[in-house]
Amino acid sequence: MTAPAVVSAAAKKEVEPVAPAGLRRLRERWGNARFAVTPLVGHSDLVTAVAFHGSYIVSGSRDTTVKLWHAATGTEEANLGGHTGSVTCVAIAPAATAPPSVKIYLR
């Protein structure tokens, strides 16, 4: 068994490809961006589908539930359980085209 090669930081820098100007600008902007990550805690298994609309997020999971979240606060607004299997796809229909039985009304 041979020992792994030790490569100095200077040697690594020499071999790394130089990023195009556009990619460098994107990395700079990303590094300077102000954003926050808010974990949405509520599903008990892997999340397999997500859809966004306005200030809402809809997520589907292998735990057989669909959840509606308020994006700004990260709070769970509704839990649509009752599916018999994993939810692998979610979509949000515009209010004008959604049948009345599919619309979700929040108070």
Image (cartoon, helix red, strand yellow):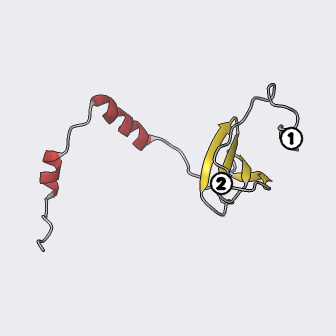
- In this view, which residue lies farthest toward the bottom? 1
Q: How many marks?
A: 2
Q: Quadrant of the N terminus?
A: bottom left
- The residue under the point 75% across, 56% down is 84
Q: Nearer the viewer, residue 75 or 50?
A: 50
Disc 2 is placed on an element classified as: strand
In the image, residue 32 above or below residue 21: below
3D distance between C-alphas at marks 1 and 2: 22 Å
Q: Amino acid at mark 2?
A: Ser
Q: Amino acid at mark 1?
A: Tyr
- The residue under the point 38% across, 35% down is 26
The part of the image, by quadrant, that contains residue 104 is: top right
Q: Quadrant of the C terminus?
A: top right
**Residue topped by disc 1:** 105
Could one spot residue 29 in this view of the protein? yes
Q: Nearer the viewer, residue 29 or 45?
A: 45
In the image, residue 89 above or below residue 96: below
- Left or right: 7 with respect to 82? left
Query: Where's residue 87, x and y in %?
Result: 67, 50
The part of the image, by quadrant, that contains residue 81 is: bottom right
Query: Where's residue 79, x and y in %?
Result: 78, 54
Mark drawn on residue 57: none
Specify which label sits upstream in the sequence, 1 or 2.
2
Q: Nearer the viewer, residue 35 or 107?
A: 107
Q: Badge 2: few (under 14), some or many (20 or more) residues near its Cα, within 10 Å?
A: many
Q: Nearer the viewer, mark 1 or mark 2?
A: 2
In the image, residue 32 above or below residue 42: above
- Left or right: 9 with respect to 106? left
Query: Where's residue 93, x and y in %?
Result: 74, 32
Could one spot residue 72 in this view of the protein? no
**Residue topped by disc 2:** 61
